[in-house]
Image (cartoon, rainbow, N blue to C red):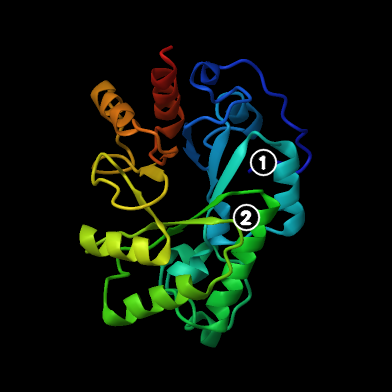
């Protein structure tokens, strides 16, 4: 997320002002990127929302999280991805970026929401990071290998039924072979928000909407004007909406969408 010596960001007038992104008002539709595609200062001149990706690979040190919050003060908003030790098995290639010194035995206890000390500690570290960043939303992104087996469903229910949430809102992004009705039932039962790319599938549950746009057919996809028109229509209604772009062209596409919302 940038160098340690970066100063606190001073916000300037931006295209976001037209849509409420850059005013004192709480915007109903919040727009940003999954991670910082450009430097933080430049990014914060345009957006006031980011989804932190580093917490998925390795939860950063407390001092670094505090520095990020100080450099990007409210109304800038952080959301974050839950640590991969909760959601992904140690066979995932994403573990190559894990710096936590865990034994082979401990690694076998990680992932898939297992009812283990390792998974519980991973949640506590994630929860602490969320509080330091003053985040309101934590995203649990599952791999497509996490299927709706009896064991996985049992672990999912145990995890979300027991974890300490405080005032955090928990959002779940299942991928792979999950039926929408089962997703709806679980989200209602476990008080989760369904995370989805609305251009692919509709959201089926949640007190607000959380959209993650990965690119239609792949991360290199550049969203068309027709795509953005459709996305704007899907942000209608009274519910709060988070719109996070996660494609190669997210910096450009998110700005185009933000201007569209503001009528710029």
Residue 258 in which image quadrant: top left
Furthest-bottom residue in this view: 105
Q: Is residue 235 left or right of residue 6?
A: left
**Above/below status of 113 relative to 177:** below
220, 216: nearer the viewer: 216
Q: Nearer the viewer, mark 1 or mark 2?
A: 2
Element class at badge 1: loop
Which residue has dot 1 on it?
A: 2
Residue at image point 31% right, 40% down: 215
| Residue 178 in view in this figure | no
The quadrant in which the C terminus is found is: top left
Furthest-top residue in this view: 264
Element class at badge 2: helix
Disc 2 crowd rating (10 Å Cα; few below 14, some 14-19, many 20+) is many
The picture places residue 86, in percent across and down from the top left corner, at 49, 70
The picture places residue 47, in percent across and down from the top left corner, at 55, 29
Residue at image point 48% right, 82% down: 115
Report the disc number at residue 176.
none
Which residue has dot 2 on it?
A: 130
**Above/below status of 23 relative to 103:** above
Q: Is residue 247 left or right of residue 166?
A: left
Label 1 to label 2: alpha-carbon separation: 19 Å
| Residue 213 in view in this figure | yes
Residue at image point 57% right, 49% down: 136
């Amino acid at each position: 997320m940038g160098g340690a010596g970066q100063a606190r960001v001073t916000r300037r007038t931006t295209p976001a002002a037209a849509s409420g992104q850059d005013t004192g008002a709480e915007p109903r539709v919040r727009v940003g990127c999954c991670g910082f595609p450009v430097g933080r200062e430049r990014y914060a001149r345009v957006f006031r929302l980011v989804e932190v990706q580093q917490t998925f690979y390795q939860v950063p040190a407390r001092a670094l999280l505090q520095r990020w919050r100080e450099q990007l003060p409210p109304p800038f908003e952080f959301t974050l991805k839950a640590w991969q030790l909760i959601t992904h098995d140690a066979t995932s290639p994403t573990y190559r970026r894990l710096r936590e010194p865990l034994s082979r035995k401990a690694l076998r206890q990680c992932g898939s929401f297992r009812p283990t000390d390792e998974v519980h500690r991973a949640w506590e570290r994630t929860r602490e990071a969320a509080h330091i960043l003053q985040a309101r939303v934590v995203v649990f992104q599952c791999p497509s290998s996490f299927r709706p087996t009896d064991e996985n469903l049992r672990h999912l229910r145990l995890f979300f039924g027991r974890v300490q949430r405080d005032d955090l809102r928990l959002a779940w992004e299942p991928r792979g072979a999950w039926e929408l009705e089962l997703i709806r039932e679980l989200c209602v039962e476990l008080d989760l928000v369904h995370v989805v790319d609305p251009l692919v599938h509709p959201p089926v549950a949640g007190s607000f909407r959380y959209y993650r746009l990965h690119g239609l057919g792949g991360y290199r996809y550049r969203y068309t004007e027709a795509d953005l028109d459709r996305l704007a229509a899907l942000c209608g209604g009274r519910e709060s909406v988070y719109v996070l772009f996660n494609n190669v062209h997210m910096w450009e596409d998110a700005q185009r969408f933000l201007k569209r919302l503001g009528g710029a």
